[in-house]
Image: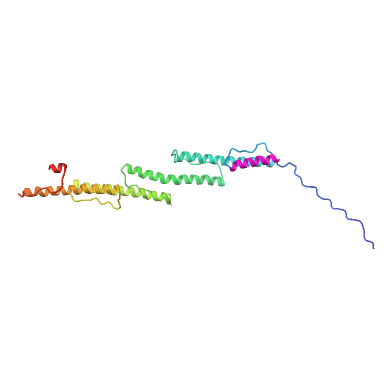
Amino acid sequence: MKKSTASASPIPSSPPITSSRKGPETGDYKLLLAALTSFKRGDFSARLPEDWTGVAGKVADTFNEVIARNQDLALELARIGEVVGVEGRIGQRASLGEVQGAWSAAIGSVNNLVANLVQPTSEMARVIGAVAKGDLSQTISTELDGRPLKGEFLRTARTVNTMVEQLGGFASEVTRVAREVGTEGKLGGQAKVKGVAGTWKDLTDNVNLMAGNLTAQVRNIATVTTAVANGDLTKKITVDVKGEFLEL
């Protein structure tokens, strides 16, 4: 049986898929690259044309929105840095309006930073203000809103609290010695303030020197006066006295 020599009908090829629209022109890519380059350099004034259509138009709109949001963020951070850091308006906070995702997280982080800086500063101002008014009972808490202070905040809080404690101890001891010697007539009292140094120690030493000199002079005068009252005229003032004590 003779084989058929008839060739099989060729399978027709599918026509190439073509877009019904033209893609972005080369000039469009150049504009996009120029805008991205400006964006990378921190120039947030760059924008893509608003008259692009189709996908290119959506790309342009989205790019312009993103760069505008970055520009808003940069301006808001600069504003917060000025009003809080320079003008001292510590109640101010950053805002970008209704934002979500990383934008919201970034604004939240900035506001948390401001709050974390402001709270210890406000506490220090409160305590120092109380000291200026003579209230030595106030101290800075080492925990704010349930969070422990750390680093420089903790070190500064402890320094302020130590200062207040030493000032309170000094004032208390000076008051006690002055009351005992000057009011109650208990001679020999000395101020004792633990852990003092520098000017605090000098002040404590001067108070004790004054109390010591006063005690020695009064006791010496009392001894001589008593001796004279008893008919003993051999006693004399032996302590080194000056001023009205010398005249006495």
Q: Quadrant of the N terminus?
A: bottom right
Residue 124 position, x and y percent, is: 38, 45
Q: Quadrant of the C terminus?
A: top left
User: Quick check: 54 left or right of 231?
Assistant: right
**Extreme-bottom residue of the structure:** 1
Residue 230 position, x and y percent, is: 5, 50
Whether residue 214 is in magenta: the answer is no
Bounds of the magenta span?
25-40
Image-quadrant location for residue 35:
top right
Question: What residue is rendered at 35% in x and 44% in y?
Answer: 128
Whether residue 39 is in magenta: the answer is yes
Residue 108 visible? The answer is yes
Question: What residue is rendered at 16% in x and 43% in y?
Answer: 242
Question: What residue is rendered at 11% in x and 50% in y?
Answer: 223
Residue 243 position, x and y percent, is: 16, 42
Q: Nearer the viewer, residue 96 or 34?
A: 34
Residue 106 position, x and y percent, is: 53, 46
User: Quick check: 106 left or right of 158?
Assistant: right
User: Quick check: 225 left or right of 37?
Assistant: left
Question: What residue is rendered at 33% in x and 48% in y?
Answer: 163
**Extreme-right residue of the structure:** 1
